[in-house]
Amino acid sequence: MKLLLVAALLGGAFLAMDAQAAGDPEAGKGKIAACAACHGTDGKATAPIYPNLAGQNVAYLENALKAYRAGERGGGMSMMMTPQAQALSDEDIADIAAYYGSLTP
């Protein structure tokens, strides 16, 4: 019984570490061409209608992009964001989020 409990706890710990795997900001910098048109290469929006992404919470950015990709986020700019996000892999999203999150607001 104790062995089963220990195995479950260790398995959960390994899953948690995998779920928190950080993206690579340097790789993200090379993946923001489409993003930069509205959010800027420095994470500062090119027009007041777009949000600044510099220094934004990385988990928030990842969750938002995944929600756009899945079609779960509506309103506002979803008609623009959903097709952009659908072209991104989980790794792309993690890298882009890490890049914008690493910038100074």
Image (cartoon, rainbow, N blue to C red):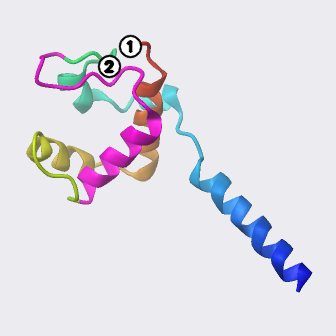
**Frontmost residue, 34 versus 70:** 70
The boundaries of the magenta stretch are 46-70
| Residue that appears at 11% across and 41% down | 80
How many numbered badges does the structure rendering display?
Answer: 2
Mark 2–mark 1 contact, CB under 8 Å? Answer: yes
Residue 72 sits in which quadrant? Answer: bottom left
Mark 2 or 1, which is nearer the eye? Answer: 1
Q: Residue at x 50, y 26 (%)?
A: 26
Disc number for residue 43: 2
Q: Residues within 10 Å of mark 1 (few under 14, many from 20)?
A: few
| Residue 78 in the figure: left or right of residue 92 | left
Task: Check disc 1 and report its element: helix, strand or loop.
Answer: loop
Q: Residues within 10 Å of mark 2 (few under 14, many from 20)?
A: many
Q: Is residue 60 left or right of residue 9?
A: left
Q: Amino acid at mark 2?
A: Gly
> Compared with residue 64, is residue 19 higher up or lower down, i.e. above or below?
below
Which x, y percent locates residue 50? 16, 25
**What is the CA distance from the residue labelled 2 to the residue labelled 1?**
8 Å
Name the residue: 70% across, 66% down.
12
How far across and how far down the image is residue 33, in percent? 27, 28
Q: Which residue is mark 1?
A: 105
* Residue 16 vertical placement versus 97 (above, below): below
The residue that appears at 48% across and 22% down in the rendered structure is 102
Position in image of residue 105 (x %, y %): 38, 13
